[in-house]
Image (spheres, rainbow, N blue to C red):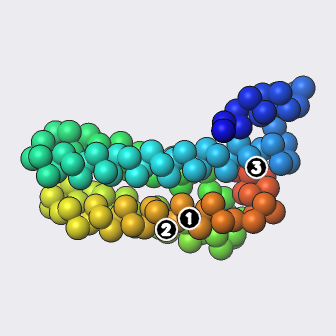
Amino acid sequence: MSIAPHLQASAPLSGVPHGVEAAVIAYSWDLMLFDRIGERVAQARAALEGRVSREKHRLLATAVQIVGELRSSLNVRGGDPLAVNMSDLCDYMCRQLAAANLQNRIATLDEVSHLLREARIAWVMLPPEARVTHAAAARE
């Protein structure tokens, strides 16, 4: 079931979501980014197996860009340990994706896929209070 219709109906008149609404939007956006990264990594793995290096390169470059988008949504200046750890993980994944692209290593792509799955599970399990805090920090 999509929550999009509910978000439009409950959006504040000012057009800028606040509180719980902002948390739902930011949280959903982050989950979508996790999913898109995973899709690109899986597609790049298939391209690597099929020896389609241009496609592999394009997909991994896109995955790195999406990881960067996820990382930019984090408020590391606020000192939030979750944000700092996630930022470090994003940095590591970008380096691993670049290495996999250069070295044509499927094992490295598998490692990144595993890390993404684990991070996504942890993100889903965040308590609602942390989601509201994350959304507030993302707006700053």
Residue flagged by tag 1: what amino acid is it?
Ile
- Label 1 neighbour load within 10 Å: few <14, some 14-19, many 20+: few
Residue 3 lies, in percent from the top left, at: 71, 37
Residue at disc 1, secondary structure: helix
Q: From the viewer's perspective, is residue 103 above or below residue 16?
A: below
Residue 15 lies, in percent from the top left, at: 82, 27
Q: Residue 102 carries which label?
A: none
In the picture as drawn, the residue positioned furthest to the left comes out as 51
Q: Which residue is drawn at 64% across and 46% down?
A: 28
Residue 117 lies, in percent from the top left, at: 46, 63
Q: Residue at x 26, y 66 (%)?
A: 108
Q: Which mark is residue 23?
A: 3
Given residues 87 and 47, the one toward you in this image is 47
Q: Circle 1 sits on which residue?
A: 121
Q: Residue at x 25, y 48 (%)?
A: 44
In the picture as drawn, the residue positioned furthest to the front comes out as 1
Residue flagged by tag 3: what amino acid is it?
Ala
Disc 3 from disc 1: Cα separation: 17 Å
Q: Residue 118 carries which label?
A: 2
Residue flagged by tag 2: what amino acid is it?
Glu
Q: Residue at x 52, y 65 (%)?
A: 119
Disc 2 from disc 1: Cα separation: 5 Å
Left or right: residue 105 versus residue 60 is left
Q: Which picture quadrant has residue 80?
A: bottom right
Residue 23 lies, in percent from the top left, at: 76, 49
Residue at disc 2, secondary structure: helix
Counting residues from the N terminus, which is met first, the one under dot 2 or under dot 3? 3
